Amino acid sequence: MLKEAEEARKDLKASLEEAAERTKEKVEGMKKQQELLIEENRDLNKNNVELSGRVGRLTQENTSLKEQIAVLTLDNRKVRAEADELREEQKDIAKLEATFKELQRQKGKIEAAYKNSLNESEKEIIGHKARIDKLLKENRELAEKVNEQAKAITRLECDLKQSEAERENLLSLNRHLIVPTRSKQ
């Protein structure tokens, strides 16, 4: 009976040690996964900062283009005023009209080019804002995953401690069972 109790104790000890080892492996795996998620989160934050910088630069370019359009609009008004003065003085009307038409055509081309550039800049800004929103969402999701992993690791560590405590209690009980048996012999 002593041998059977000893074998049962050994089997129980081996089983508890295997369970503890599996739990430790799971904890290590989850810690590695957590580290990978943290690194990925850092990369996303870095990309977010870079995209924010690009959006800032595009916004500055957009503002500059708007200022240039305003300057061109003022220049156009000045040209019209000069054309009116020249018409009043009756000097070289045909030449002034041709010049004025050319300036209008160029103004249209320039305004079209600036508007096109402005539209492209606004599209890029919208695209970058959408990407930033996506990255922020991914960042939040990763943070939630990291928190969940940390909670799971904490639970596993608690389970491991509890398993070790139960193992110690069983070993202690086993020792108490074995000791009285020896004293009877």
Image (cartoon, rainbow, N blue to C red):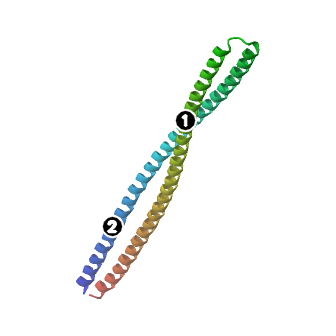
In terms of depth relative to the viewer, which is nearer, 90 or 13?
A: 90
> Residue 147: image x %, image y %?
50, 59
Residue type indicated by callout 1: Asn
Considering every residue shown, the one lying at the far left of the view is 3
Crowd rating for badge 2 (residues with CA inside 10 Å; few <14, some 14–19, many 20+):
few
Quarter of the image with the N terminus is: bottom left
**C-alpha separation, residue under disc 2 versus residue under disc 1:** 63 Å
Report the residue at 49% width, 53% height from top: 138
Considering every residue shown, the one lying at the far top of the view is 91
Report the residue at 55% width, 35% height from top: 116
> Residue 121: image x %, image y %?
55, 37
Instruction: Determine which residue is flagged by label 2.
Output: 22
Q: In this view, does 88 lie to the left or right of 11?
A: right
Residue type indicated by callout 2: Arg
Q: Is residue 95 left or right of residue 130?
A: right
Q: On the image, which quarter does residue 13 sit in?
A: bottom left
Residue at disc 2, secondary structure: helix
Q: Does 4 appear above or below 74?
A: below
> Residue 5: image x %, image y %?
27, 83
Report the residue at 30% width, 86% height from top: 181
Residue at disc 1, secondary structure: helix
Rendered image: mark on residue 116: 1
Q: Does 165 appear above or below 154?
A: below
